[in-house]
Amino acid sequence: MKFTIALFAFLLFSLSAVAETFADKDADQDGKLSISEYAGDDKKLKKNFKKLDADADGALSEEEYAAGEKKGKKDKKKKDKKKKDKKGKKDDNNI
């Protein structure tokens, strides 16, 4: 019983932490994301929107959004690896 409750709590927390999907962001359900749907008031995301809008039509298609998400995950992995490598070098210098 305790395991079931713990599992349920974990799943509930995990689901609430899931990133927004394209459909979640597409408020008017027109099949594309406007800059306000994608970025809101976030200046960094607004800048990123322009990079992701490959056809420069002022909206993100689901494909453009997915490509941006994939690139973002790849960039985060690179950044995390750099941090880890930098920390490793720092630790090696302290020996």
Image (cartoon, rainbow, N blue to C red):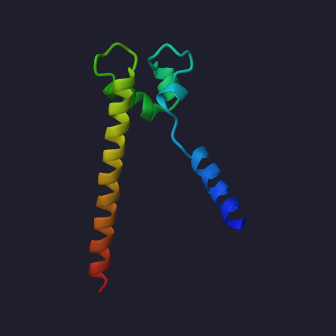
Q: Is residue 79 above or below residue 46?
A: below
Q: Position of residue 41 (x, y in %)?
A: 53, 28
Q: Residue furthest bottom?
A: 95
Q: Residue furthest right?
A: 1
Q: Position of residue 80 (x, y in %)?
A: 35, 57
Work out whether residue 40 can be spotted: no
Q: Nearer the viewer, residue 24 or 94?
A: 24
Q: Position of residue 44 (x, y in %)?
A: 43, 35
Q: Quadrant of the C terminus?
A: bottom left
Q: Is residue 83 above or below residue 90?
A: above
Q: Nearer the viewer, residue 16 or 92?
A: 16
Q: Residue furthest front?
A: 1
Q: Residue at x 33, y 65 (%)?
A: 84
Q: Residue at x 33, y 52 (%)?
A: 77
Please give left or right for residue 44 compared with residue 70 in the image: right
Q: Is residue 37 above or below residue 43?
A: above
**Among the 4 quarters of the image, the one containing residue 48:** top left
Q: Nearer the viewer, residue 5 or 49?
A: 5
Q: Position of residue 19 (x, y in %)?
A: 51, 40
Q: Residue at x 31, y 83 (%)?
A: 94
Work out whether residue 19 can be spotted: yes
Q: Quadrant of the N terminus?
A: bottom right
Number of numbered discs overlaid on the protein picture: 0
Q: Nearer the viewer, residue 60 or 16?
A: 16
**Among the 4 quarters of the image, the one containing residue 53:** top left
